[in-house]
Image (cartoon, rainbow, N blue to C red):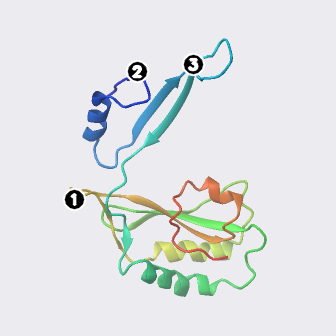
């Protein structure tokens, strides 16, 4: 469905379309505008973005954040030798908690800007995530369960690579 408006305020038709969107559905927004500046001729500019409504109940490790941190510490973090991460080294494992609470699509985030290439540590982190017990899945107030993505980051959180991960600031655990 598609609806247009004449200004920066959503009209009723646009709001209705957003309300009717299925849980977890991406909503594409396209904004066309003329910049306000002192130029005599302003070309129409365009801004595109996608949004989706977050579920009221985020996916959660059974036992909560403290138990999750304990699991990660015992199964991975404590097994990483001191000094493994130098300067701006950072590694990240992206994964999804599906509608049943299972870990899926666990993979190493790789970027040309990422310098940390210790295969043994990356494999340990990846296996720790893949072997993690099930979670309580993310859920909307109406009971619809949806998948949710997470990222485990280990290393220097000041690394510029962190901005490429496209993650919220609620990281699972940090290791400086």
Give the residue drawn at x 73%, y 79%.
84
Give the residue drawn at x 52%, y 77%.
128
| Quadrant holding the C terminus | bottom right
Q: Distance between the residues labelled 1 and 2?
A: 36 Å
Residue furthest left in the image: 142
In the picture provided, is 3 more to the left or to the right than 173? left
Question: How packed is label 3: few (under 14 Cα within 10 Å), some, or many (20 or more)?
Answer: few
- First in sequence, mark 3 or 1: give its number: 3
Mark 1 highlights which residue? 143
Q: Closer to the camera: disc 1 or disc 2?
A: 2
Q: Closer to the camera: disc 3 or disc 1?
A: 3
Name the spot of residue 43 as percent of width and height, x first. 61, 16
Question: How packed is label 1: few (under 14 Cα within 10 Å), some, or many (20 or more)?
Answer: few
Give the residue drawn at x 37%, y 23%.
4
Name the spot of residue 50 as percent of width and height, x first. 45, 40
Name the spot of residue 72 as percent of width and height, x first. 52, 80
| Quadrant holding the N terminus | top left
Q: Element at badge 1?
A: loop
Q: Nearer the viewer, residue 38 or 14?
A: 38
Q: Distance between the residues labelled 3 and 1?
A: 43 Å
Mark 3 highlights which residue? 44
Q: Element at badge 2?
A: loop
Question: How packed is label 2: few (under 14 Cα within 10 Å), some, or many (20 or more)?
Answer: few
Q: Element at badge 3?
A: loop
In which quadrant of the rendered view does residue 111 lie? bottom right
């Amino acid at each position: 469905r598609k609806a247009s408006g004449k200004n920066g305020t959503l009209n009723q038709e646009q709001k209705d379309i957003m309300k009717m969107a299925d849980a977890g559905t991406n909503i594409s927004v396209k904004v066309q505008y003329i910049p306000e500046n002192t130029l005599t001729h302003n070309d129409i500019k365009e801004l595109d973005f996608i949004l989706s409504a977050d579920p009221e109940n985020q996916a959660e490790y059974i036992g909560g954040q403290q138990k999750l941190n304990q699991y990660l510490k015992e199964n991975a973090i404590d097994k990483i030798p001191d000094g493994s991460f130098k300067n701006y080294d950072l590694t990240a494992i992206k994964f999804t908690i599906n509608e049943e609470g299972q870990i899926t699509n666990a993979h190493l985030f790789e970027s040309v800007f990422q310098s940390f290439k210790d295969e043994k540590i990356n494999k340990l982190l990846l296996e720790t995530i893949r072997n993690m017990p099930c979670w309580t899945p993310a859920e909307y107030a109406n009971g619809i369960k949806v998948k949710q993505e997470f990222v485990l980051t280990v290393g220097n959180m000041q690394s510029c690579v962190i901005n490429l991960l496209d993650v919220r600031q609620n990281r699972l655990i940090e290791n400086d």
